[in-house]
Image (tube, helix red, strand yellow):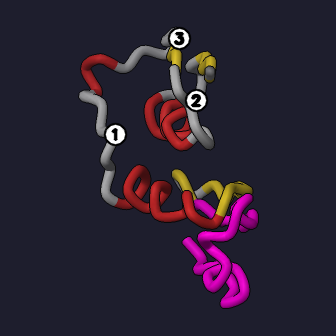
Amino acid sequence: MEKPRSDETTSAFAYPSPVCEVKLTVDKEKLHVHLPVIERGRLDMVFKSNEYAIPTALVRPEMVVIDVGANVGCFALYAKLRMHRDAVVHCF
């Protein structure tokens, strides 16, 4: 993931948080995600540290994932990109 510009990091705790663009590469596909600067570390935990690792035996193409308390959608991204692209993801 690319680091935010210096003006984005200095104002990370401003309210509301400024938005940054994060570039993800998942299975050789490049994606651009916009999220609050203060949530950037969460994407690192989810995608680099594999914090939400789900056992592959539980993953099915027809999965329906419900993300209650979705915040900025990190788990929703993980479910769609790392679990299964055909999964249906609902966020609340």
**Residue at numbered disc 2:** 85
Q: Is residue 27 left or right of residue 23?
A: left
Q: Is residue 22 visible?
A: yes
Q: Which residues are magenta?
A: 1-24
**Residue at numbered disc 3:** 64
Q: Is residue 21 visible?
A: no
Residue plotted at (62% across, 21% down): 92
Nearest the viewer among 57 and 72 is 72
Q: Amino acid at mark 2?
A: Arg
Do the numbered discs 3 and 2 sit on residues whose CB atoms are within 8 Å? no
Q: Is residue 21 left or right of residue 74?
A: right
In the rendered image, the residue lying farthest to the bottom is 6
Nearest the viewer among 81 and 14 is 14
**Residue at numbered disc 1:** 52
Mark 3 crowd level (few <14, some 14–19, many ≥20, 10 Å Cα): few
Across and down, in percent, residue 34 comes to 73, 56
Across and down, in percent, residue 20 comes to 72, 67
Q: Secondary structure at mark 2?
A: loop
Q: Secondary structure at mark 1?
A: loop
Q: Nearer the viewer, mark 1 or mark 2?
A: 1
Q: Amino acid at mark 1?
A: Tyr
Residue plotted at (31% across, 47% down): 51
Q: Secondary structure at mark 3?
A: strand
Which quarter of the rendered picture does the N terminus lie within?
bottom right
Across and down, in percent, residue 30 comes to 67, 59
Nearer-N-terminus badge (1/3)? 1
Q: Is residue 6 above or below residue 92?
A: below
